[in-house]
Amino acid sequence: MTTTDNKILTSAIETYRRYAGQPTLSDIESCRQDSNDEIVHLTPYCSTMDLVKLEDLTYTRSFTYSLKTRQLLFTSNVTPINKNIVRRLASPDGKYVALVTKETKGEQELQYAQIWHDEHLIFGYEVSDSKISPHGKILPKNDYASFFEWSPDSRRLVFTAEEKRKPLKSYFTADKLDEIGEPASVYRENWDEQMEAFETSVVCIFDLDTKKVQLIENQPNDLYIGQSSWTTNPDELIFVAFRLEPYRLGLIYCENRPSALFKCNWRNNEWKQLTDFDQLCRLFPRHLPKTDNEFVYVQTDIYRAHAQCKRLVLFNTETKQEKILIDRVDNVTYSNADPFRAEWNTQFKGLHMSPPRLGYSSDGRYLLLPSYYVVHEMFLNVVDYGTPYRLYVFDLKSLSKKVKDPNDWYLITEHEFKTEEKNRIEWNVDRFFPDNELIPVESVYVHVRDTQAKRPLMVLVHGGPNSNVPMNYYIGVIAYVALGFDMLIVNYRGSIGFGQASVDKLLGNVSKTDVQDCHEAIHRCLQHTEPSRSVILIGGSHAGVIIGRLIGEYPTEYAASVLRNPVMDLLHTYITSDIPDWALAQSANVPFDFETGRNRFSDTSLITYLIERSSIRLMDQIKTPVLLQLGKKDKRVPFSVGLRYYE
């Protein structure tokens, strides 16, 4: 390695270390006001990266803020969340903390559950203790397949755990055959990608009054209980259930799986099914805090796009009647704009995100719903590429005012770069409408302000495909800009945040409209800036479809490409991925059927279509250097797909 190479690499390492170490806001553990509503106590979760251990770090930090004087009264020290902490949750009244930790002894991993009151440990047990624990290991956090929730009165905790299994014994040492237990070699189905730990789930209640843990009995054996919400009745909960038969498809990021709603009285072990398993996916129930028998949830269609524009539905548990509160938004009308001069469009483009866990106002009148505006993610965390985070409190009483006042927002804390550094970075939005349609393609150009240097253009193509790249603080953008690249982030048709019409446009058009959109977005950027500069493509997963086609169809236009576990072969992905329905829906707009499953080889037109739309067909035309980054643990796009492309 030459001296110049050493300098470049050293600079890259230090630059990435600087930006990767910046904290970002990830969640809120608790938010309480005192009796006169003048003091707010906040405990957010923040994340950062440890580049020595190569892992993400999470920590909490508490703030006490005076709304009356607009002063920050107290800031605690950072409290790192140990990797051995499986679950941690403060009660709504702030008096209790439920904690689940893990510890390895020999070859065995043990779990310990604890309840703390102020500084006192008031209850605890070892999960494998058969005298106390009716369940197996408590499941880790997952938005779809586990929960860990205090009741509104802070007296009970509901959580999911593995079912208790008999300890494994040899046939030759067991006194009775029914003591043997299930062999470790028996396959146990799970929810695949990032969810291999989620095999079975039982629902348990810890009662603070009795200091006992009980299993809710009569849970349907053919269902997996994945989400919950306490009702106004402290004995009742709302659950979301997924079918286990005939087999499971991948669940994470797939908000299009058949699901049904249940109501359960945990004291009487009574289960009542509220909805059928029909053509709808029902997720994220949130019971109205001041109203009996009513809750809201989000609703999408099954087996189409994995992420869609959502409906917000009000459900009455007594009448089983449903009312759509917020319907899907198909599309909105935009004003014309010159290239890279599109303004921030504030029209409501539908719900594309899930409601937060603590989303209701204290009086129960308001439910806060995050969503996307253009490529901005709007919530309490208002950031951009140059600001890791800002934490605000908003006075909901001001919603009744006719004239909005900026003073209704209270800045608790922020973390941003120095003014001169932040002001060097500029971003512009380009919006255009391919095929003379009303569906937009939006790209964001992030660059250094007022530079005369000819900088390479790095194009970031997101995966999904039903996702987007919001203008949050993003290490992969800010670090590359600091290293001398300009960035173009493309949200092609099929991205979320632009209404349902954009999502539906890609169904049956994969490797067509998405490739066309990205190619046109790149050329618009080059024409607007510097046409002759080098262009590098980077992306993973579904971006492999797009980038693979771009470097195959335009072999001389791109200087280099980086592909992370890319989808290069749609037929291979259909056969091996944990989401075979994705390949059918996006490539041919064909619904998934459990009866045929992956065995549709008699449909020669479908198989031919999958092959024709695969990027791997163009590999002989590729001249662009390709860096392949393959991860062996990926169940969504198995590394064998990318390995075949390499071979």
Image (cartoon, rainbow, N blue to C red):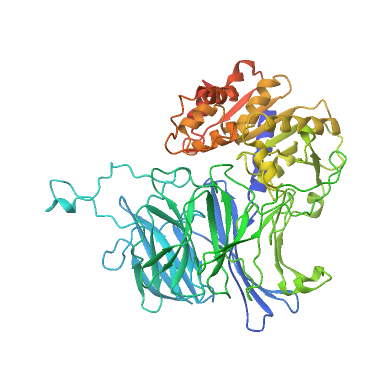
Q: Is residue 146 left or right of residue 170?
A: right
Residue 348 x %, y % = 74, 55
Where on the picture, by quarter, is residue 559?
Answer: top right
Q: Residue furthest top?
A: 620
The image shows a total of numbered marks equal to 0
Residue at left 50%, top 23%?
644
Residue 519 x %, y % = 74, 29
Depth check, front residue: 64 or 141: 141
Depth check, front residue: 98 or 314: 314
Up-down relation of residue 336 to residue 583 (above or below):
below
Up-down relation of residue 468 to residue 138 (above or below):
above
Q: Is residue 395 left or right of residue 59?
A: right
Residue 550 x %, y % = 68, 25
Depth check, front residue: 351 or 386: 351
Up-down relation of residue 66 to residue 554 (above or below):
below
Q: Is residue 216 left or right of residue 431?
A: left
Residue at left 72%, top 38%?
490
Depth check, front residue: 263 or 430: 263
Residue 262 x %, y % = 45, 62
- Quadrant of image for the N terminus: top right
Q: Is residue 591 left or right of residue 389?
A: left
